[in-house]
Each structure stands twice: as C-alpha cells, then as structure tokens.
Image (tube, helix red, strand yellow):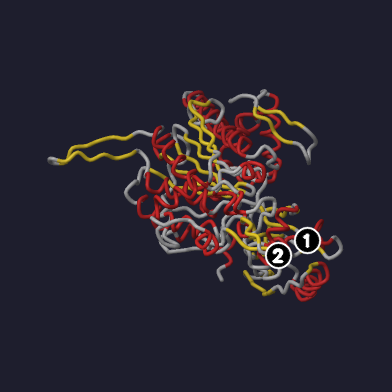
Amino acid sequence: MNIHEIIRQPEGRRLEFKRELPDNESLAKTAIAFANDAGGEIFVGIQDSPREITGLPEDELFGIVDQISNIIHDRCYPPILPEITLLAEGDKPVIRVMIYRGSLPPYYLKDKGNRHGTYIRVGSTNRLADEAIVAELDRRKRNISFDSELVLEKSAKDLDIHTFCEEYRNRTGEALDDQALRKLDLIKDVHGIAYPTNALVLFSDDSLRNTLFHYAKVECARFKGTGSEVFIDQKSLYGNIALQAEEAYLFVLRHINQGATVEGVHTITRWEYPIKAVREAIRNAVVHRDYSALGRDVKVAIYDDMIEITSPGVLPPSIKFSAMDLRQSEVRNRVIAPVFKRLGFIDQWGNGLKLIADELRDYPQIAFRWIEVGLTFQIQFVKKSSGSGFEANTTQETTQETAQETTQETTQETTQETTQETTQETTQETTQETTQEAPKKRQRNAKETLKATQKTTQKILRAIALNSEITREELADMIGLTSDGIKYQLRKMVYKGLIRREGSTKAGKWIVIKSD
C-alpha cells in the first residue's frame, strides 16, 4: 500500500484522515457509519487540511492501537471487528483502521440504542440516521427489499392496476393474472387474502398510491441558462412508475437539439447529447431509486450546458462508476427491477453502465460526471465547451477525481478572491510587476475572480435547489471548500439577497430568493 497514493485521495464515503486519535465517540461514530454502509478506512497520523503526513509518537503506537480496539469494542453494537495495521513513511508512523461492511445492521452506539445512536456516512461526515434509514438497514439485515413489503390497507383485487396490466400485455404479450402477479412477487397471500406489495402499489394508478407514495414521481424542468431560477418548461410525472421513465425521456428529447449531416447518399442525424446514455440514466433513476426515502422525487433538469438526473438514495456499495466498462449489478428494488426487465426497459443485468460508457466514447465533447449529494445520487452530462468550468472532465470520472478537480478549482477561486480583497497581497503583486503590466493584470484578475465567484455561487444555488436542508458540511464536501469557506460564501449570498434561512441552524432550511 503506497501511502502517497492514499493521501492524494479526498475524504469521503470510504475514507477519513485524523492527525491524532479522535475522541471516543467520534471514532465510534465513524466505525458505525462505515459498518452501516460500504465499509471504509480511518488513517490516524495524517492531517486532512492541509493534507500532510504528521505521524504518531513511536513509543505510543501500541497504546493507541489498543485504545482504538477498545473504543470500537466498548462503544459499538453489534460488535465491529476492525483490522488495524501500521504503516510508515520514514520516521512518521501511521495507523490504518479498516472497517468492513457489516452483515448485521443497523450498527449503533451501545449507550444510545439504535433509535438515537445509528450513524451513516454522507460524503465525508457521519450523520445520525432517521427512522426510515434505520428501517432500511434492518431490511438489509433480513435480506429483504422495501418494494417487497406488504401493503395491508387494501386487498390486491381492489387495487386499480388496469393501466399497468395493459402496458404489461402490450410489451410482453402476456396477461398479468393472479398467477403472474404471485410469480413476480407483486402480491402475497395473508390468511387466504391476496395483498399487494409496495411494488404493485407503485405500478398502480390507485388512489392508495398517491396516499402512500405521493413523492414517487419525476419532476422534469428545462431551465433558462445555467441556473435553476427561471423555468422555460416544467412537467411533473405522477403516473405509475412503469410509464415515468419514457415520459421523462420524451421531455428531454423535446428540449435538446438534433443536427443532420450528409454522408454520400445518406442523411445522418445526431443529437447534441448521447441520448441512449441519457435514456439509460433516467431508467436507472426510476428503477433503482430508494422508494423508502420519504419526500424525495427523481429530478430531470436540462440547462444550457448540461442534463442533470438526480435520484433518491446513494449509490449501492458494490457499484463503482470508475469501472463503467465492467458489468456491475446490485439491485436495490428486487421486485420492481425484474418487472422492468420483463417490460423490456432493462436489457441484461449489469449492462446499464457499460451502455453509457460505450456511447460516451462517440461523444468526446460531452463530459460525464457523477456525485453523491447528501442522500441522493446525481448524474450529469456536461458540454465541455460550454464555459461551465467542466472543460477538463473526461467521460469517466470517479468521486476522487471529481473531488480533486473541484477542490483545485474552488481553492484557486478562493485564493483569487482573497487576493483581490487583501491589501497586503495586492501591494506585493504590484511590487513584482512593472508599472505598465500591473493595471492590466489586476483588471484581468478581477474579471477572473468575478467569474470564479459566480461559478461557486451557482453551484451553491443548485445544491440548495436540490436539497433545501443541505448542511454546511455537505456543501463543503460538494463544492470543495472548507466549512468556514462555505460559511463565508453563504453569508455573502444572504447579504446580497440571493438566499435566506428559515428556522434554526440545525433544523431549518435554505430558501432561494433570486439568481446571482
């Protein structure tokens, strides 16, 4: 293991750096969050900001190792067994604590219980899990999915599934009778009565669907420019989920351009975006979204510079977008996904990412970016030549690459802004330049600083539009600034009248007032 490669990675869902041994509860929370999610590594002896190998006192190493082991054993339940190893960089020893994905979630603090002591990993922070997340972790332990759970409010025979049955017959040529519904786990018998699962309610057009899953919709929007303040067109797709993906895809086609070239006797048409990849991304958002996430919908947003698709739920732990060419598959919705496969929306398990990767090769002018924003997963198809700050992107990016690029960009932006505002630095710059060059350079720097600041502002506005309850720490992870840097930016935006805060610091939310 190369420690220099490790320290180049950003903190995130599977990685945390500590200069010294953290306090007992902080270490236990991180271990619990990693065990409840994809697992992760804690490196003690590496400072995060600025990133530097500081090392630990050599004569205290084994005592620290014992402390780590005891803290995790004493504070966490069910038991978590860390793998603790020592690394060395010259005379600077570092401790690596590996936490594996647990098989008995939810994991929680012993003294607080699973209702108040369960933590999950969101970006590079540990967040207290709410009841819905605790329930989802418990389902994972029992190896069942949310869409397979029964709905007892109404029997299956009283549920309105007429439209879904017609769609199923048209696409498969088969009748969706009771036998087929049972085979697909869409209905189950309890004391001789057939009840629908959550999946069948979601596929239905019944009023029960709107009562239980009013948030299970797709919000489509075409925005003016590159911000999310002015709508050109907007559509909410409330119908059953079997129809949502294709309706959202048609909305996209209405709002993107198509060109034509003549090659010999043939006219070749070409869309400005890789539409097969976009279609696959929309389907994945509907099929694999977290339907247990209350109050969250799928969003399909079209800007002048990109198409952005946001789906509730973080990426499954086993899926890596950095290996898009490989056939990867982890099904969150174990009833819904097979039905979509029967309907022909899913070609073959694990082919979705490969399909996206293959088509992106024919669109070198389009950058592909993905990011986890809080408890949502977001995909972006970005025009590299749009001037949106994405020109350096490649068609396949990992979270590491995205975070590194964002960190470099925002650090540069912050430094430029600070340079403009600090009299001392301005004086130093003037002494280094000739009298003729200095005014021109200052003017050029001022324009660059203004442009950079506007980019950061737009990123924050977009993030708030997606999640009004986003925390300062989550914004810092997403934008690439420190928490204090985000605090400074938010204060400026409030002063300018762009946003306002409603409610308390912990329980409130952000409101977008107007664009920059």
Q: Which residue is depicted at the point 41% across and 61% down? A: 348
Distance between the Cα atoms at labels 1 and 2?
A: 9 Å
Q: Position of residue 241 (x, y in %)?
A: 52, 47
Indicate which disc, 1 or 2, sits on the residue closer to the N terminus.
1
Residue 408's place in the image compared with 385, above or below, is: below
**Residue highlighted by disc 1:** 22
Q: Amino acid at mark 2?
A: Val
Circle 2 packing at 10 Å, graded few (<14), some (14-19), many (20+), is: many
Say which element carries label 1.
loop
Residue 261's place in the image compared with 440, above or below, is: below
Q: Which residue is depicted at the point 63% across and 70% down? A: 90
Front-lying residue, 226 or 302: 302
Quadrant occupied by the C terminus: top right
Q: How many marks?
A: 2
Residue extending farthest right: 111
Q: Amino acid at mark 1?
A: Pro
Residue 234's place in the image compared with 108, above or below, is: above
The disc label shown at residue 44, or none: 2
Q: Quadrant of residue 254?
A: top left
Q: Are marks 1 and 2 in contact (CB under 8 Å)?
A: yes
Front-lying residue, 65 or 402: 402
Q: Left or right: 438 with respect to 259? A: right
Say which element carries label 2.
strand
Q: Position of residue 23 (x, y in %)?
A: 81, 61
Q: Quadrant of residue 190?
A: bottom right
